[in-house]
Amino acid sequence: MKNVVVNKLNFSYDKETEVLKDVSLEIEKGQYVSIVGHNGSGKSTLGKLLIGLLTPKSGDITICGLPLNKDNINEIRSKVAIVFQNPDNQFIGATVEDDIAFSLENQNIDRKKMPELIKKAASDVGMIDFLTKEPSYLSGGQKQRVAIADSLVRNPEILILDEATSMLDPSGKEEITRLILELKKKNKDLTIISITHDIEEAYKSDHIILIQNGEVVLSLPPKELFNSYELIEKYHLDIPFEVKLKKALIDNGYKVDEESSLDELGELLCR
């Protein structure tokens, strides 16, 4: 089942300069997809269009089988949650628990059911021990975990991460990337769309969609993309560290399995 279908989408902020040009793409239910591109490519604009924060100039968007229009917008927004790059802009409550509760209050959830739902969402993102903490005392990675919990507590079918790691240091980025992979294992039906310029994060996803100058130029699995130096050079892409390490090991006479993880490559070096 396709959870997202975009057909010949066009968008302009000033009605003159095309930010997105005839964008078409499909995302399967349960997929973890990275939408990548350089700054100004139009990838974040696409994310806002997918939840109806912006209106396309032309083209069609279908979310969870529903056409994105005025009649369906509320139902679609109940199925889609988005996390932006700065979690501080999303915090409302005085504590982590209050903040997650606010998401439930917006859905008119029975207050008796809230504690259990809050604990589950906090547990899913590894923040169960921080429910009474003030968000201002959390690290960047912890804040982003809470922002994701705010979204997950609504039980969305699609989770959009709009540059959710861009303001984090390397350890914070790795923390959130690991969390995304954990969420995917726990809920195989959850569709995750990560809008990012972080190639290390994108490499761990199921599928990559590359946007350049407002157009989709590539849509393929990460390993297929990064095994092609022709494509890497053509689109001026960075190479993930894992791919660089595998190539270096092979060049130095090591036998490397293409499916080897970074940990397995490390063990190979230590032998």
Image: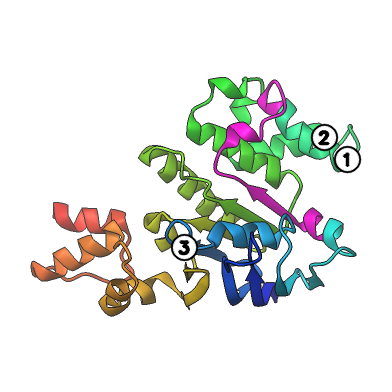
The residue shown at (75%, 51%) is 155
The residue shown at (53%, 46%) is 164
Q: Quadrant of the C terminus?
A: bottom left
Q: State the separation of the CA atoms marked 1 and 3.
A: 36 Å
Q: Is residue 96 above or below residue 270?
A: above
Please tell me the numbered disc located at residue 109: 1
Q: Which sits in the foreground, 12 or 34? A: 12
Q: Which residue is mark 2?
A: 114
Q: State the separation of the CA atoms marked 2 and 3.
A: 36 Å
Q: State the separation of the CA atoms marked 2 and 1.
A: 7 Å
Q: Which residue is mark 3?
A: 36
Q: Earlier in the sequence, mark 2 or mark 1?
A: 1
Residue type for callout 2: Met
Q: Find residue 112 and report its image quarter.
A: top right
Q: Which sits in the foreground, 49 or 31? A: 49
User: Which numbered mark, 1 or 3, is in the foreground of this view?
Assistant: 3
